[in-house]
Amino acid sequence: MKSKSINALKMGVSNKIIIMDLIRYEPGITRREIAARTGLNPSTVTNIINSLKEMNFVFETGKKSTQNPGRNSIKLGIMKEAASVFVFHINVEDTIFGIGYMDNSVEILQHFSTENDPSAFFDKISEIIKKYYARMSKKPFGVSFSFPGIVDRLHNKINIIPHLGWKGIAVEEELKKRIDGFDLRVRIANEAKLSLKSEKAVNSAIKDKINGIYLYLSQGVGGAVLINDTIYTGSNFIAGEIGHMSINKNGPICRCGNRGCLETYIGVDVLIRQYEEQKKIPASGVREKFKKLMALYIEGDETAVETVEDMLTFMDQGIANITNIYNPDFIIIGGMGCEFPKSIFDRLNERIKSKALTPAGDNVLIIPPSVDEALTTLQGSTIEAMDEYVRRVIV
């Protein structure tokens, strides 16, 4: 009898989490739709919804028109400020800070230059956390970081960020050294994996696809892999480092120490350097220079066209390899790849049909991200943190 009671309790908690997630990811869903989707009895769904309302997690947002006979269904939403988390997107040049909320939305609050010295960086981060924590009446439960490198998520440790020269940094320890009584839950993750997490949640083009790749284009080239609807991290959280696929044994030396890595041919800083060997780009900073380079490419500037087409030749090779190895449903080219014009995506889709094996090349969809590089990582950080929070508090 005791075993049955424990199993019933576990089942009740599991059902509550499932329903909570449905409302978080599909705002406006109704009780009727939840019952149909989960197979739960309508009265069970109603009881769970009432419990979530009592916890101030869920609210009713109005009526949803339907063709079915009977009363219109009530739409459900998530209480935005039921929980919050500090989120940081760290790039080589700049860092963006915001607050993520229970409904997966993000409020961006600050931009500032990324300090090259990790000690100075964490001094700055700590001051921001203390300032905003003191201002908030309902305190956030955690702080999440998106980093452009290889991180150990289990121990909240930066293994290496090559373009910043950071190695072996314990993030939570750095914060505890600087903030008295620090008790926020710390999460760290790679930018590409968080971007893929975000896209799976908000991008309707891939909502029903279960195998895919996120190629994160920046000063380096990162990646994330979706297998059977789960982001695959590997044993040491390194899986998906597409930029370090070697495509030329005699190629340029990469920051990782090997030769001819994909990122030595298609990294944003490489393109800018190649163009500026002939002409100066009238902009400052890598991101603004890359935007200008894309504008020049669209305008037909001869040097820009030559530079970008050369890069796309290597990108064809990398994407063909990825397609043959993983046979993905989709490949998103994100990060600064969100600046690519539609013509580049059209070209890549057409070229991969002939370069990759059949039918993998015919069926893969190569698309841009649905949101820009900063928002997608901040949103991914928020979603992951809230996933964990929901499972911790709903017991």
Image (tube, rainbow, N blue to C red):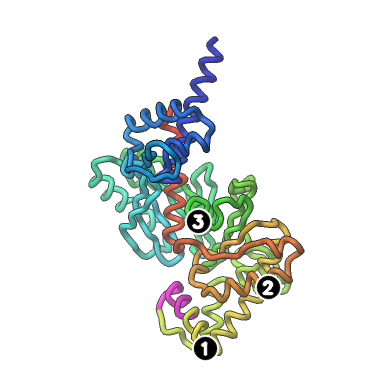
- What residue is at 39 percent from the left and 61 percent from the top? 95
Residue at the extreme front of the image, as rendered: 69
Q: Quadrant of residue 390?
A: top left
Distance from label 3 to label 2 (Cα)? 24 Å
x 57%, y 84%: residue: 305
Question: Which is more toward the observer, 207 or 64?
Answer: 64
Residue underneath mark 2: 351
Name the main secondary structure of what is drawn in magenta: helix
Q: Position of residue 36 (x, y in %)?
A: 51, 36
User: Residue at horizontal 56%, vertical 82%?
Assistant: 274
Relative image position of residue 12 (x, y in whole percent):
48, 25
Residue 92 in view, yes or no: yes
- 180 and 287: which one is in front? 287
Q: Earlier in the sequence, mark 3 or mark 2?
A: 3
Q: Which residue is mark 3?
A: 203
How far is mark 3 from mark 1, CA to CA? 33 Å
The magenta-colored residue range is: 284-293
Mark positioned earlier in the residue sequence (1 or 2): 1
Task: Say if 5 sits above or below 239 in the image.
Answer: above
* Residue 289 lies in the magenta-colored region: yes
Q: Residue 301 — which label?
A: 1
Q: Residues within 10 Å of mark 2 (few under 14, many from 20)?
A: some
Nearer the observer, 185 or 107? 107
Mark nearer the N terminus (3 vs 1) = 3
Vertical arrangement, residue 374 with respect to residue 385, above or below: below
